[in-house]
Image (spheres, grey):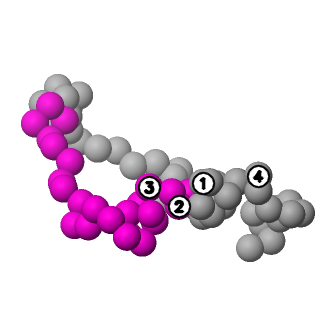
Amino acid sequence: MPNRRLHLHVSDEELARRLAQWTPPAPPLTSGYWKLYIDHVLQADQGTDLDFLVGKRGAFVPKDNH
């Protein structure tokens, strides 16, 4: 991507209209490991760990060591 930029040729008004009409889809599963994963696994920039384990481990491991 040139200059690491993406330009969307849609007006702010059109985006607002679409957002007002959008509803999130229902999750395909509502329990079990899938639900645990969706609710508690952190994003890659946060370490992809379970959020309830943050601060509960031993020595700190920098993200560039993964």
Residue under pointer 4: 55
Amino acid type of the residue that numbered disc 4 sits on in the rendered structure: Gly
3D distance between C-alphas at marks 2 and 4: 14 Å
Residue under pointer 3: 39
3D distance between C-alphas at marks 2 and 3: 6 Å
Query: Which is more N-terminal, label 3 or label 1?
Result: 3
Q: Secondary structure at mark 2?
A: loop
Please tell me how many numbered marks the rendered image carries.
4
Amino acid type of the residue that numbered disc 1 sits on in the rendered structure: Asp
Vertical side of 61 occupied by 24: above or below:
above
Q: Secondary structure at mark 4?
A: loop
Query: Which is more N-terminal, label 3 or label 4?
Result: 3
Is residue 17 in view from this perspective? yes
Indicate yes or no whether the magenta region holds residue 36.
yes
Where are the magenta residues, as a range?
Answer: 19-42
Vertical side of 55 occupied by 15: above or below:
above
Image-quadrant location for residue 66: bottom right
3D distance between C-alphas at marks 1 and 2: 6 Å
Mark 1–mark 2 CB contact (< 8 Å): yes
Residue under pointer 2: 41
Other residues around mark 2 within 10 Å, as few (<14) / some (14–19) / many (≥20): some
3D distance between C-alphas at marks 4 and 1: 9 Å
For image coordinates 10% across by 36% down, the residue present is: 21
